[in-house]
Image (spheres, helix red, strand yellow):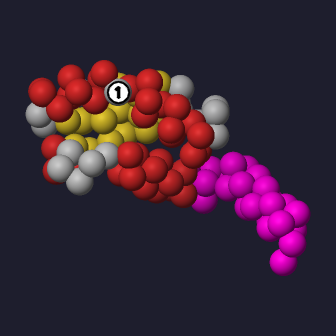
């Protein structure tokens, strides 16, 4: 397949997922979780108790206050990487709790 054809299929799939919330929302949620986990070091992952995505805000629950402060310092870096991976409009803000 040519690159143009692959790109067109990707665009069609993205459009479909965005147009049907019943299908698109769980897919987006899984994509966000996957992208977030790839940004973390293996040693950091056990301290993330859960993540939540709602209305453009990714909330990350962290069980270690020291790690929470470290993640806060790297927030801009995380936001850039996630926006690059998921699209500019997807994640507007990251909150660590």
Binning the other alpha carbons within 10 Å of mark 1 as few (below 14), some (14 to 19) or many (20 upward) gives few
Q: Inspect this view and state whether residue 46 appears.
A: yes
Task: Indicate yes or no whether the magenta region holds residue 16.
Answer: yes
Residue at image location 57% in from the left, 36% down from the top:
83
Residue at image location 51% in from the left, 39% down from the top:
82
Residue highlighted by disc 1? 74
Q: Is residue 47 above or below residue 5?
A: above
Q: Is residue 27 above or below residue 65?
A: below
Location of residue 62 in the rendering, given as x and y in whole percent from the top left corner: 20, 36
Residue at image location 54% in from the left, 51% down from the top:
28
Give the position of the C terminus as an image quadrant: top left
**Left or right: where 57 falls relative to 46:** right
Location of residue 42 in the rendering, given as x and y in whole percent from the top left corner: 23, 54
Which SS class for mark 1? loop
Q: Is residue 53 above or below residue 45?
A: above
**Left or right: where 33 falls relative to 43:** right
Task: Indicate yes or no whether the magenta region holds residue 29.
Answer: no
Range of magenta residues: 1-25
Q: Inspect this view and state whether residue 29 appears.
A: no
């Amino acid at each position: 397949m040519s690159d143009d054809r692959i790109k067109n299929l990707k665009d069609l799939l993205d459009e479909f997922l965005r147009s049907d919330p019943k299908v698109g929302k769980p897919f987006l949620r899984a994509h966000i979780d996957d992208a977030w986990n790839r940004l973390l070091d293996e040693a950091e992952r056990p301290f993330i108790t859960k993540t939540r995505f709602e209305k453009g805000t990714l909330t990350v629950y962290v069980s270690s206050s020291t790690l929470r402060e470290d993640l806060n310092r790297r927030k801009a870096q995380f936001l850039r990487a996630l926006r690059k991976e998921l699209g500019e409009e997807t994640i507007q803000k990251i909150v660590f709790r």
